[in-house]
Image (spheres, helix red, strand yellow):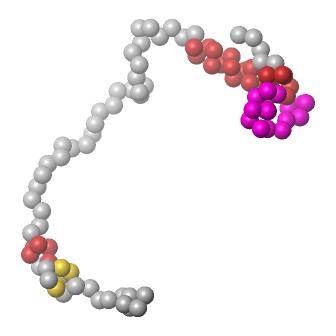
């Protein structure tokens, strides 16, 4: 792979609307070249016999199965309430109606 040129870095900077100095062009060209070489090395790995995976180690679901269990009846739920009205918990009003 050919090294990235200063002109290519300047072009990328213009596309990204970045203002870069002449010194930064040289610095960025070297840094981008190293990055592109690293990406190229990853692409060279022979992986025809390796199946694609989402994780490097196998995952096991450690959650329990969902089991439907009966809940409280309305009477059971309201049995411990200090005040009940129309089969609902009754609580003191905290806001005026004029709000």
Residue 22 against residue 2 in the figure, above or below: below
Q: Which residues are drawn in magenta?
A: 10-24
Give the residue at x 79% y 22%.
Answer: 8
Residue 48 against residue 97 in the figure, above or below: above
Give the tally of numbered discs.
Answer: 0
Q: Residue 15 location, x and y as percent?
A: 75, 32
In magenta segment, residue 97: no
User: Is 40 on the left-hand or right-hand side of 11?
Assistant: left
Q: Residue 98 location, x and y as percent?
A: 41, 91
- Quadrant, the C terminus: bottom left
User: Is 49 on the left-hand or right-hand side of 92?
Assistant: right
The answer to whether any part of residue 63 appears in the image is yes
User: Is 3 on the left-hand or right-hand side of 98?
Assistant: right
Residue 79 against residue 9 in the figure, above or below: below
Within the image, what quadrant is residue 5 found in? top right
Give the residue at x 85% y 35%.
Answer: 20
Q: Nearer the viewer, residue 74 or 67?
A: 74
Q: Main secondary structure of the magenta part?
A: helix
Q: Nearer the viewer, residue 81 or 2?
A: 2
- Quadrant, the N terminus: top right
Within the image, what quadrant is residue 2 found in? top right
Q: Residue 35 location, x and y as percent?
A: 69, 23
The answer to whether any part of residue 80 appears in the image is no
In magenta segment, residue 15: yes
Give the residue at x 41% y 8%.
Answer: 49
């Amino acid at each position: 792979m050919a090294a990235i040129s200063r002109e290519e870095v300047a072009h990328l900077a213009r596309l990204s609307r970045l203002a870069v100095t002449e010194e930064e062009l040289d610095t960025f060209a070297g840094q981008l070249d190293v990055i592109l070489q690293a990406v190229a090395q990853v692409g060279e790995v022979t992986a025809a016999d390796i199946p694609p995976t989402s994780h490097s180690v196998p995952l096991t679901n450690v959650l329990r199965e969902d089991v439907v269990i009966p809940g409280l009846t309305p009477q059971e739920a309201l049995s411990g309430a200090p005040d009940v009205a129309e089969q609902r918990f009754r609580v003191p009003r905290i806001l005026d109606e004029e709000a």
